[in-house]
Amino acid sequence: DRSISSTLLVPAATLQCFISLSILVFIPIYDRLFVPIARSITHKPAGITTLQRISIGIFLSIISVVVAALVEMKRLKTARDHGLVDFPEATVPMSIWWLAPQYVLYGVADVFTMVGMQEFFYGQVPVELRSLGLSMYLSVIGIGSFLSSFMVSVI
């Protein structure tokens, strides 16, 4: 159910905004709260290592997918309870807001992964090639998107 009120219907693509909003909210929290706390615990200038940042991001992405699976199980149960499984055009009586947590988690995971990958590619290339570091980071994301699309089409 994508309705907020009796007259306002939320487009499904609007859920992508939760990713951007959570990135906008979490980056200052990450920079002003998480890094200083991690710095005081680990006594490292960056708080945690680059690979630890990327690992936290990947772990949070996994949690996001688990949350998405749980929400889908709830949606399917609701559809079964209302006899809507065989009617793909029917609206399942479940709020669109059930989907928000997975998008917020994905945005927070993106913060850790993006920052970690940018630091990794910037710090691991020679000074002369630093401008290529960002392009390598974006290339990894592009290759991941192609592989993801390939896997979805195969499965």
Image: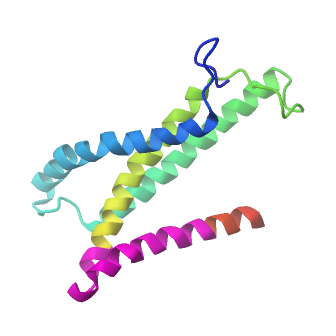
Judge from the rendering whether residue 148 lies leftward or rightward of residue 93; answer left or right. Answer: left
Measured as percent of width and height from the top left, residue 61 is found at 48, 52
Measured as percent of width and height from the top left, residue 119 is found at 27, 69
Say which residue appears at 62% left-offset and 32% top-offset.
11
Measured as percent of width and height from the top left, residue 56 is found at 37, 56
Q: Please, is residue 101 above or below residue 125 in the view?
A: above
Please state the extent of the stretch shown in magenta in the rendering. Answer: 121-146
Quarter where residue 32 is shown: top left
Query: Is residue 127 one of those drawn in magenta?
Result: yes
Q: Please, is residue 108 above or below residue 91 in the view?
A: below
Judge from the rendering whether residue 49 lies leftward or rightward of residue 61; answer left or right. Answer: left
The quadrant of the image that shows the C terminus is: bottom right
Q: Please, is residue 155 above or below residue 109 in the view?
A: below
Toward the right, the furthest residue is: 86
Say which residue appears at 59% left-offset and 13% top-offset.
5
How are the residues colored? rainbow
Identify the main secondary structure in magenta.
Answer: helix
Say which residue appears at 60% left-offset and 18% top-offset.
8
Judge from the rendering whether residue 31 lies leftward or rightward of residue 99; answer left or right. Answer: left
Quarter where residue 152 is shown: bottom right
Toward the front, the furthest residue is: 7
Depth check, front residue: 127 or 108: 127
Say which residue appears at 47% left-offset and 47% top-offset.
106
Q: Please, is residue 91 above or below residue 103 in the view?
A: above
Quarter where residue 44 is shown: bottom left
Query: Is residue 77 one of those drawn in magenta?
Result: no
The quadrant of the image that shows the N terminus is: top right
